[in-house]
């Protein structure tokens, strides 16, 4: 009899681990059995909230034959080991981006995964956002004709803590990596050239930590489509997420989402709209749910998840190319 | 020990009964024990879907001491009896609008309710819509100053079946009653004068059935605020729900909601937005959830629900006044 | 040889007289010969600015055979006499609304005009506004199907001086008369029923002067189309002019115009748009030019101007009906 | 006595020459005395239309002591000679962009101009567009704080004739040069680095002619501000002109302009807006008038025009850098 419900172990009880754990717990076709986190208090609290238990270490949880799937939402440097260990035990994997900051480790991880044929999904949740999906559906249906120009605007409401930035891999690998994935998906073709320009304008401490906070990139595909991405670590008006796809037949673009559809006018302002959704947790709430749906459906139906490990690798290649172009001032070519 | 979860009986397994039953079943502080519907197949199916059982008649379900609360989502002509029977057994009541089409029965029902001090909520779900709430919050905070003009646009994507129209009580009591409630709430004051104009423009069969499908009303409050409502039973572009509140300091208005934030431009159109949310089930999905939250919270906290039986009565008075004004061409005064 | 340029006399050197005089003076097919105003200083100044001369009284100017056409932009109580005198002398007439506040005088004026077959245009400039024209063109092309609901929002940035209000004929005849004309034009059919509700909310002095400043009206045509108009003498956010036409096939509506297309977002507001065009002089600048073009073209081509004396009479009938309905609370029927 | 009216000679009777000649002719403080164009029929027609005469060659017109100012709207390769000849005769110069396609000739021209202290304005009309002005005023007032990111979208409705493209200097020097000027003005600082990516996607004939039709650029200033520009020679939905300026305090952006403010909804589209202004003649009509006002005012007031020859040189430097970056794939540095 075909299985109709999956049992999960969730690695990581931080902000994003909590989000995934709760989504899994509330999903009609899934349940969480274990929460694993080196911070045992966080693990225990989360486990208690959602009716799961904790496991003292990943190996113990992975040894449990009841476990069908894992969510990897722990710190980035643990991703590869957890993916590999899970795959070895035959567990399906939903891993938060990035797979790793080091392309060599990512390549090795992908090589390992070839030996263990388990479904692996990478958490580029924006592909599951209803607005982005509608954009991509319009492209696929030919509504914009040949895609020629893509413009992605992606600005955070404020920078993360400096401690996070120091281990993040830098803006291109940590933040713009989402936009690189979106670009690949919307262009429908691999970018082969990357140029990047960046600076530190938001907070000089970010610069001292070796990172930048303001950046622009251009990608070019083999057929000559162009994609621009701009990022800032701080937008006073909120989390700014807009995409524009222009082609031979027209344009489809997306506006930001807002909690309500009200418009205010008074003696100092006219037609001001509601504030933006605060940050990714709110803005991409539905995306995370759809991503999980896709993963569970893929595992149950024994098909590949929509966004896989190779997508994780490709996005990292683009991020690395942007880092290099920013450093050298030259176009970096991707094979 | 204070109760922290309510057990429900849901009367009615039609479209709106299903919606409520599912919302109750999914609510962390509630469960459905019984579904009651004279169409036993519908009751059984719904009960099975949400893990409840059926009861052969209301009395049996109401006799169960486990039942804390009921949802009345059966046909309108059964509302008063079910409210009264439930109240007599000490059950809290969440009843779909309208209480009844006959103001005398409504008055009697309210008189009965005074003897049985149970929480009674009437399902004017639009007050719980986040966009409407933001509008009302802006008013309450003084952002528009004194409310002077309110304009409510409310148009259905298409007319209901003729069989429904025949027993609906007519457009003013069936459809515009929601807008009358919204008007009272936004005006913050009772309308004392009503004028109505209406015609049959959408479908002559509606006219033959004695109803109208296209209508405009003006309400006036004692302090001189004015409110306009317009309704149509058919809008080709979808379910059109907009509200505008104008006052001494400015204006707050609401736009329609859409599934996504995409905009399309091509050689025949520019900046076309996504379609509207299909109909009330989709557009007011969050409102129904918030309404239920408010009801459950009120029952658990032993406070009055936000929208009560008197609100149901008041909205019907306005609808009746509109019917009379439409017939006589005169202003109808509400005491 | 056909004439290709018209010589004008302009009656009135106030705000609206100046506007017309300057438009005529700048028109390639027209010139102003006389400015006539009892306030001789105002007349002299305006005449000097545009290279015209003054005439001591209307009769003198009208006796000049060079004069082809007149603009009547003097105070309302002089309109009928000037129209009649001009018509008697064979001059084409472009008269500001209203023809008169007294329907009997208007009727007599129209009877007189039948004897003197001169082109007479009434200054309902909003029909010449490009946005309103696009609306009406869409209706005429069948884009909304049968017109069923029209909603006209018309709010001034602030009330006129009390002295003006006292002689204005009241809000319905002075301000809403523009909207009555627009309604007739967009409905494509004469309204046969009028109900009005109004109050004094902006300034109690307006109430003491016997007028109202906040009003709502519903018009109904024979075929059952409905039109709502709302007016306020004060909108803190500026001159609010919006029209919505809803029908069996869809909706066409208009938004306000703004000097620029900028959008501002910061930590307190998102996507606030530019302020509204200040008032009618700015908002309807192009309308006044188009109105004059239509008049000059009509006179030169010996055709009827697009908006004539009967339109002036019809709008006044609706305004009078609104006054009466406001007083009696009843529907007023127009034959 | 100070002069209060200028007499012009207009060089060029093509599309843009006509536009300028008509604007000058209609300006209250200017008149056109001569139209000069090697195509004598075009010159004669235009001269007749606006009440000017033709001159057989530039020297003859420039020898006329009545001439105060010239408009250079002839073909690009004649600009430098006409500027220099006019300056030598003491005439003020309003020259269409670009000064020349060859930076060496531009440098020599600027050196020559130092000897003849006449006012020279370069026709970057977009700086005079009310919407762009409002953007720049908001920046200057500090509303966006420090400018960090600028995004300029500039797409033509369709490509020009191939014959034009062949002599145009290419997309960067012919089309994007306007955007380079806008970027400098909005950034408030000189770009010091340029990267460009481009391709031929609209029409392969453009590629065969050695040009590109689809392009993206990033500019970086010394302080680290970044500016992205994207161009296409063909947008099916019309002339797309949008600007976005993002900074430490917020964002100001501009939307496209449209002839009217109507919105259409039916069973296939919702809230579609009016078409875009057709092309630059329509979209920047007011800009050309404001540009001329600024020039005339500068000449009469003996001040420098707002946009001068050095601005023309700077924009060409950026265009040349883009050409080189597109060719080499490297960042080009501007001193």
Image: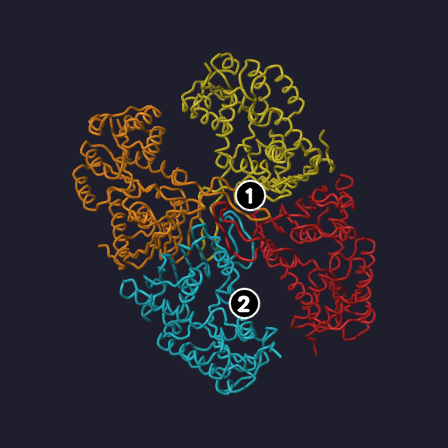
Chain colours: A orange, B yellow, C red, D cyan
Asked whether the residues under marks 1 and 2 belong to the same chain, the reply is: no
| Disc 1 versus disc 2: nearer the observer | 2
Q: Residue at x 58, y 42 (%)?
A: B252
Q: Chain of mark 2?
A: D
Q: Which residue is label 2 attached to?
A: D290
The answer to whether the residue labelled 1 contacts the one labelled 2, judged by CB atoms less than 8 Å apart, is no
Q: Residue at x 83, y 54 (%)?
A: C104
How many discs appear?
2
Q: Residues within 10 Å of mark 1 (few under 14, many from 20)?
A: many
Q: Residue at x 49, y 12 (%)?
A: B65
C215 up-or-down from B328: above or below: below
- Comparing C182 with A110, the one in front is A110
C208 up-or-down from B108: above or below: below
Q: Which residue is label 1 attached to?
A: B235
The percent position of residue B310, horizontal first and vertical second, equals 63, 25
The percent position of residue C73, horizontal first and vertical second, equals 75, 62
D31 up-or-down from C98: above or below: below
- Comparing B28 with B46, the one in front is B28
The percent position of residue B331, horizontal first and vertical second, equals 73, 36
The percent position of residue D291, horizontal first and vertical second, equals 52, 69
- Comparing D167 with D307, the one in front is D307
Give the alpha-carbon distance from disc 1 to disc 2, as whole Å.
45 Å
Q: Chain of mark 1?
A: B
Q: Quadrant of residue D221?
A: bottom left
- Comparing D236 with A61, the one in front is A61
């Amino acid at each position: 009899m075909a299985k109709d419900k999956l049992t999960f172990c969730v690695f990581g009880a931080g902000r994003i681990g909590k989000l995934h754990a709760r989504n899994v717990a509330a999903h009609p076709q899934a349940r969480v059995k274990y929460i694993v986190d080196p911070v045992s208090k966080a693990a225990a609290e989360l486990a208690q909230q959602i009716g799961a238990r904790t496991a003292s270490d990943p190996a113990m949880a992975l040894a449990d034959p009841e476990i069908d799937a894992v969510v990897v939402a722990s710190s980035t440097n643990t991703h590869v080991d957890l993916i590999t260990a899970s795959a070895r035990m035959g567990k399906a994997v939903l891993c938060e981006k990035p797979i790793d900051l080091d392309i060599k480790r990512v390549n090795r991880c992908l090589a390992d995964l070839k030996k263990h044929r388990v479904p692996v999904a990478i958490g580029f949740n924006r592909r599951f956002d209803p607005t982005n999906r509608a954009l991509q559906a319009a492209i696929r249906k030919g509504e914009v004709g040949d895609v020629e120009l893509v413009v992605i605007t992606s600005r955070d409401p404020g920078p993360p803590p400096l401690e996070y930035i120091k281990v993040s891999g830098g803006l291109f690998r940590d933040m713009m990596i989402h936009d690189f994935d979106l670009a690949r998906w919307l262009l429908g073709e691999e970018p082969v050239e990357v140029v990047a320009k960046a600076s530190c304008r938001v907070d000089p401490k970010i610069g001292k930590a070796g990172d930048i906070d303001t950046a622009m990139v251009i990608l070019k595909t083999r057929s000559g489509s162009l994609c621009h991405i701009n990022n800032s670590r701080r937008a006073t008006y909120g989390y700014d997420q807009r995409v524009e796809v222009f082609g031979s037949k027209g344009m489809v673009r997306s506006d930001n989402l807002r909690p309500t559809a009200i418009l205010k006018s008074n003696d100092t302002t006219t037609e001001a709209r509601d504030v933006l959704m605060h940050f990714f947790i709110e803005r991409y709430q539905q995306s995370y749910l759809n991503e999980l749906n896709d993963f569970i459906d893929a595992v149950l139906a024994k098909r590949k998840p929509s966004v896989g490990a190779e997508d994780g690798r490709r996005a990292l290649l683009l991020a690395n190319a942007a880092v290099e172009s920013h450093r050298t001032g030259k176009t970096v070519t991707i094979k």
